[in-house]
Amino acid sequence: MTLPQSYKSQLEYIQPSPKFKKLINGQVEAANFPGYSVITPPGEEDSQNSNFYQALQKCQEQLIELLGTSLMIPVPGNSFHLTLADLIWESAFLDASQNNPLFEEKLRSCIAESFQELSISANGHQIQWQILGIIVMTRSVGVSLVPKDETSYEQVLKLRRLIYQNPNFIALGIEQQYHLTAHVTLGYFGEIPSNLDIAGLADSISELNHQWLETTPEILVHRGELRKFDDMISYYRESDWPVVDL
């Protein structure tokens, strides 16, 4: 996904993201997109990874300069995070919560069970992932992450299995997201010009990746948290919601 050829093929199929909408005055705002995920603490709350998030902020600024804010709608740097497990969102979440008044309470209970099981079996190994390069997805752009070692990979995989294979979680009828492309989203696509220079952009994005050839920023995945979101720029939790120290 970080090869020049991948950029060229992916840029041909990018689409405006429905997660943002343009207002009459020309301003862009985040659209309603509610749901739950298990994520690392957002950048503004994660002092242990301040250098990592500073590197992402710099990368975002480079992409804005390259793509422009019409094509790339940047997300606030204080909301940067790594999603450890997608849970439920938009229409599926709205339907589930309307059909079952206790849905959110049960979801939080299920995640607490899975976190408890993981904390019991924790091995104390530091989980570290590192930036591989920029990735272009259909409706967004960000940086992809790879595990620094096998144990870092296995621990994240274990967390996801404990969530998705929890019988009580399955009973809630949530579609399980087994495929993981570890990444941090930096922006979503807005207006896509008809004369987009695909080859030129692909080459420029590839050049941006050179900055990580010598020093690769790493994120210490030290905590997983259940977070709710109403849109793609704010992720919040109550003090008694489940968390797990990794």
Image: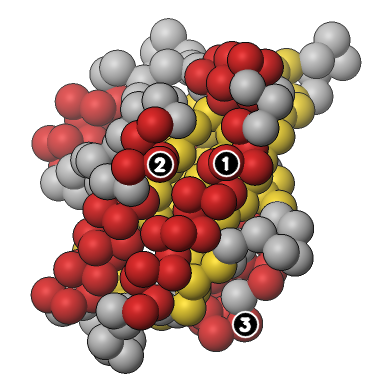
Question: Callout 1 environment at 10 Å: few (<14), some (14 to 19), or many (20+)?
Answer: some
Instruction: Return the x and y of residue 203 as percentages of the image width and height.
Output: 24, 43
Instruction: Return the x and y of residue 63 as percentages of the image width and height.
Output: 48, 48
Q: In the rendered view, would you say 171 is above or below 185? A: above
| Along the viewing direction, whichever of 28 and 100 lies nearer the viewer | 100
Q: Are marks 2 and 1 in contact (CB under 8 Å)?
A: yes
Q: CA distance from mark 1 to mark 3?
A: 31 Å
Q: Dividing the picture into quarters, in which one does residue 197 lie?
A: top left
Q: Are marks 3 and 2 in contact (CB under 8 Å)?
A: no
> Looking at the image, is mark 1 or mark 3 nearer the viewer?
1
Mark 1 belongs to which amino acid? Lys
| Along the viewing direction, whichever of 55 and 96 lies nearer the viewer | 96
Q: Which residue is mark 3?
A: 47
Q: Dividing the picture into quarters, in which one does residue 73 lie?
A: top right
Say which residue appears at 65% left-offset and 42% top-offset: 105
Instruction: Return the x and y of residue 60 as percentages of the image width and height.
Output: 52, 54
**SS for callout 1:** helix
Q: Which residue is mark 1?
A: 106
- Could you tell me which quadrant the N terminus lies in? top left
Q: Are marks 1 and 3 in contact (CB under 8 Å)?
A: no
Instruction: Return the x and y of residue 246 as percentages of the image width and height.
Output: 40, 78
Q: Which residue is mark 2?
A: 168
Say which residue appears at 62% left-offset and 15% top-offset: 99
Q: Is residue 7 left or right of residue 228?
A: left
